[in-house]
Image (cartoon, coloured by chain):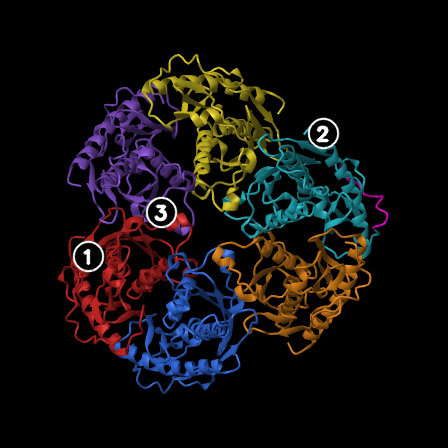
Chain colours: A red, B purple, C yellow, D cyan, E orange, F blue
Amino acid sequence: MTSSTEFPQTVFRSGGRAATALRPTRLVPNFVATAEGSVLIEAGNTRVLCNATVEPSVPGWLRNSGKGWVTAEYSMLPRATLTRTPRESERGKIGGRTHEIQRLIGRSLRSVVDLKALGERSIILDCDVLQADGGTRTAAITGACAALALALNRLVTAGTLPKSPMKELVAATSVGIVDGNVLLDLAYEEDSQADVDMNVVMTASGGLVETQATAEREPYTRAQLGLMLDYAEAGIKELVLLQQQLLQGPA
Amino acid sequence: MTSSTEFPQTVFRSGGRAATALRPTRLVPNFVATAEGSVLIEAGNTRVLCNATVEPSVPGWLRNSGKGWVTAEYSMLPRATLTRTPRESERGKIGGRTHEIQRLIGRSLRSVVDLKALGERSIILDCDVLQADGGTRTAAITGACAALALALNRLVTAGTLPKSPMKELVAATSVGIVDGNVLLDLAYEEDSQADVDMNVVMTASGGLVETQATAEREPYTRAQLGLMLDYAEAGIKELVLLQQQLLQGPA
Amino acid sequence: MTSSTEFPQTVFRSGGRAATALRPTRLVPNFVATAEGSVLIEAGNTRVLCNATVEPSVPGWLRNSGKGWVTAEYSMLPRATLTRTPRESERGKIGGRTHEIQRLIGRSLRSVVDLKALGERSIILDCDVLQADGGTRTAAITGACAALALALNRLVTAGTLPKSPMKELVAATSVGIVDGNVLLDLAYEEDSQADVDMNVVMTASGGLVETQATAEREPYTRAQLGLMLDYAEAGIKELVLLQQQLLQGPA
Amino acid sequence: MTSSTEFPQTVFRSGGRAATALRPTRLVPNFVATAEGSVLIEAGNTRVLCNATVEPSVPGWLRNSGKGWVTAEYSMLPRATLTRTPRESERGKIGGRTHEIQRLIGRSLRSVVDLKALGERSIILDCDVLQADGGTRTAAITGACAALALALNRLVTAGTLPKSPMKELVAATSVGIVDGNVLLDLAYEEDSQADVDMNVVMTASGGLVETQATAEREPYTRAQLGLMLDYAEAGIKELVLLQQQLLQGPA
Amino acid sequence: MTSSTEFPQTVFRSGGRAATALRPTRLVPNFVATAEGSVLIEAGNTRVLCNATVEPSVPGWLRNSGKGWVTAEYSMLPRATLTRTPRESERGKIGGRTHEIQRLIGRSLRSVVDLKALGERSIILDCDVLQADGGTRTAAITGACAALALALNRLVTAGTLPKSPMKELVAATSVGIVDGNVLLDLAYEEDSQADVDMNVVMTASGGLVETQATAEREPYTRAQLGLMLDYAEAGIKELVLLQQQLLQGPA
Amino acid sequence: MTSSTEFPQTVFRSGGRAATALRPTRLVPNFVATAEGSVLIEAGNTRVLCNATVEPSVPGWLRNSGKGWVTAEYSMLPRATLTRTPRESERGKIGGRTHEIQRLIGRSLRSVVDLKALGERSIILDCDVLQADGGTRTAAITGACAALALALNRLVTAGTLPKSPMKELVAATSVGIVDGNVLLDLAYEEDSQADVDMNVVMTASGGLVETQATAEREPYTRAQLGLMLDYAEAGIKELVLLQQQLLQGPA
């Protein structure tokens, strides 16, 4: 990696997007009427349906602890991708990538929920990718946080909880290095050419929850890591604003 | 079953629907951009996403036969239902109901395709239920037929096939007996109270492809079977019109 | 389908069988000594062993409901067929066809049992095909109904139940259209050439429990459906007589 | 174990059977018409259906070796036993006992077949227990050897092989120590009380193929092992006579 | 088999080992610090790590019986063998050989434990093969018995049990016939050429627990069986001495 | 998190270890003789056996690409931990944590191998944890890199490859924040109390390959992330020295 990453002025992104720009992103509340909290997140061509389910019990190892649990499941519809991906239900097992992603989503959401205040109930966030164009796991975190907030608000409205146990919002985005340029919110095409791929999960108040930077081709430097974090922080602040708009709207 | 089924004038259905009326039904083409044919079907609160995939090979037992294959997979998102249904991928196996439904969809679609004219290629119809309120398997047939037609038309447009191997359209609906009344296109609430539950698959020209009538509580008579078929035929004719509109539109 | 189905005088069936005739059918009680009810049914070359097991518990969703449950499992020995079929236990999962059949058998039997009167116990009907020559699922229903009746009678004899919770007998047969002719009780060879394949499940008093007609090659008309039902009804009446003989014998 | 095993005069066996006597044993040829070789073996109340399948290929590791393969699969119908045993296909996996038994059957049969002379074909012996009363694995070996011989003879009759590649017959029985007495061919009730349980597989010419003696409660001595072998040898000679009768009959 | 087995003076074994000699064998206590009893057994190049776990519960069918249970699990690391063996966890199921071995280990250990005196607790012996050169199952029995003894002694030291419920030690070895010669404790190379392969499990006082002799190529005679037992008994007496040394050492 | 992380002078670690100190770490070459490369790594009480297998083929999607592949499998022996962990082979599936770890190990190793120069062969690194006390995944990377280097050197020695396709060494360690103090190379006890847990994978020349920092309890700041990276870099430099010593020794 000899090219400088400091002056990324020569990048051409689809739609004339700037290196520091998120894709057009939209959060659609109540996409299905059946779930306690439902948000469809669209980030460019990536579309993930995030549905929250409140269940009145906790996993065995939390029973009688007074604490609740938040977990996530992630899946892609077979034709979310340009080439059909066989269903994991047909293959009879969940793949490694799926496991990794749903563990990441669950961990990220638990970081902003007071599990003691939630009480002995579980919330499952089902994140189903309807269309995939890169960044599905970070979109799932951002959308699932909004769906979780809706479901918790509903527990407050119903009088089940005195106040929402969500401490603050959390959102996520990806960032990467392509041809020596740091780019925010990679689309699939960009992601497949990236030398480094990073996911950042951050709370509304700026606390880091997860930073994971992977060299796909070439190792990276501390300086590059810093620059990627700068881009990601800016993007996440924008995403939190979208979450706040949705939650102030007529849920 | 002592009450007469001939005069169903006293039925009250949600939204004032007549016993002989379909729910408001809509076919949305190209719901995802990634599939060769994509149709979202909405029948009342039931929403099924039907995506067609064209693959250049056939199952082993058809190799070198010169014939193609059409098959289907069916699944429900966990929160398609009011109570969350665990994923079949998590349980590691496909349930009996799922198998039964995807076999029915595949059989129905094959009945209207000239597999010889299709040549040695497979078309997979993925039917994923986003929201369920009864009648998901018949909605899947109606929607999948439209998605299949779009995918086949695309093969013609691309010059891969001289003409579409679809012989005619096929659609399906449910019909049942509730409190002695024959009702068309049962919603979930009605279905769960039905004494008899019937699915009918019929071609545009009126040929029967599948008739399956199941007594859930009480056996039924030949006369009742006839009446149910009358209702279903009327409903299916309407559904075929919707399919035709979609196919004449700007696909 | 241009040939008329009204005058099937030109059909030649194996053994000179008439279009309206069942294959030679025999019900052998107590084929194994280990089960609470055991019947071997032979219909031509098809042989199915039907064993009933009474268990003192019900599935979770029926606990404390005061109601019982009747269910079925269906399997073929690997060499029931001319070409060996691999075991589902070796493949590690139950196939779609098996699921569909055991759901049908269970549903059919439950339609004639007063589950409230059965009380909180389960009856499992194991239907194992020793030799297959078409019509195994309908033979299984007819044989399993007899095995179930034997098991219920034994509960009465033992004083566990005051009277049998079986409301009436139920039996089943297949019927189809081959070369334009309606034929009763298809053997494998006939079934593989059939344009339409129908299974009918009917109670002793003539109530329809399940009618399922599938177009394998060409759609069928309402008139053809009616004729197939006529044939099936006649056949099932005969089968019920065989069940009654068995139950009046020295069980 | 203080009682002497030398004078077993005080044993009372069901039906007044002597300590050295086999149960009434019968080999029924051609129990199903669908298999290349089919034998039902009845040993007392134990009934095992043994069907041979000839397949024109061998497992991967034998391809192009010029050698054939003989293997076995073993299963019990759920109600072969007094208490119902769940199907392994439902549990999704084969149990340890089943694996052990089918490996034993395969090994025993291969010991008497010239795999080179068989050529690159496989023979699968399906051993399905219809009714179980002890000794199912040894009955399976004895019955499967007869079914295998029938299938190989058929290959000779068809001109596929110049002569049968079976070098000699092989049969098996169990023997055990109950209350200090050596008993031949244990029924289930006896087996469950045995201190030592032994299976012996021997060829027609008296060569030992497998001897497996397991202390279930108390260790055993060399002298006891010798006595058990004496009993088993006598029993197996009788079983080989039954096999020879079957093979000389009108197969 | 024409060569005499009585004078095996011409055998050349790796390292000049006598036909009657065990491989250099070593028992290393406390190989891991995490288990209640841990022994690494090395027999020539075969190395098996045997770890005992004490659990405070028993399988369902022993609950409220006042009796305990001893069981074993056996596995090979992928590179225990010269050619890598895929993990059973990756294949999603335990193979037949593994089942057979772990059942044998469990049975052998239970034969020397007073399960009543153990009380309602389970001991699991994990036997993991780090390097395999023949005889892994018999090495596992010998090593697991020592690990079990250590774990039981620890229960006595902790005051949980008044005295060890182990009645005596048990050990195992293999013996076989290669080129007409009886050889003790076969290494992999020898085992793969053996005509007969035998495993013997014997208690310290000389009681036989399991004798299993399998003809891999040619049947064997009673005389050969006797000679194999002679060799095995001598080898096992030596192994018991090693176990006793370990248990008298500073555990 | 109110306490300062800059002055961690008050931390007491087991064995008086400094906050910036690795645990005593040892790399034992050729732990098994059966693998192409074998290294046992001991980091404190954590012991991981890393074995490299060279296979002459690549996964399907790399065939005819001229490129090789490096992958890893990770597993823990049941008693690597103080409480026994059931085997994944018994449960019939690989857990999410295992998938995540083996993907991380594979990715890390591939970052330092020239896959083109490796040619169409696969190297599998089996990482089996014999004893676990925190940091097993990072120990596995460090040990597996050494085992991989040994295996590649052997391919050079054998003349299969002209020079080793390993571009440089790679090693990994963990770092975390406990009670406000940054600590290097967390033992299990420390890890379970950590607010933040970070894994760093770095090449010998200081390039970052993977940085993954997870907030377990409280979010972390950019400053804390920087400090953790400082500690990790120092530790990894030391680990690379150990790898170099091993590779210069008599392999």
**Mark 2 neighbour class, 10 Å CA radius: few under 14, some 14 to 19, many 20 or more:** few
Q: Where is residue F194 in the image (x, y as percent from the top left)?
A: 37, 74
- Foreground: B127 or C194? C194
Crowd band around label 3 with a 10 angstrom C-alpha radius: few (<14), some (14–19), many (20+): few
Asked if the stretch drawn in magenta spans residue C31, the answer is: no
**Circles 2 and 3: CB atoms closer than 8 Å:** no
**Amino acid at circle 2:** Gly
| Amino acid type, label 1 | Gly
Closer mark to the observer between disc 3 and disc 1: 1
Q: Is residue B128 visible?
A: no
Foreground: disc 2 or disc 3:
2
Q: Can residue C102 be seen in this view?
A: yes
Left or right of B136 in this view: E78:
right
Q: Chain ID for label 3?
A: B
Q: In this view, does E244 lie above or below E233?
A: below
Q: Name the residue under label 1.
A: A44
- Taking depth in this image into account, of A162 and A23 the one nearest to the observer is A23
Callouts 1 and 2 on one subunit: no
List the residue tagged with mark 3: B85
Q: Which mark is residue D249?
A: 2
**Whole-percent x and y of residue F162?**
44, 73
F75 relative position to B167: left or right = right
- Mark 1 packing: few (<14 Cα in 10 Å), some, or many (20+)? some
Q: Please provide the residue range marked out in magenta.
A: D5-14
State left or right for residue A22 relative to residue A214. left
User: What amino acid does circle 3 point to?
Assistant: Thr
Q: Quadrant of the N terminus of chain A?
A: bottom left
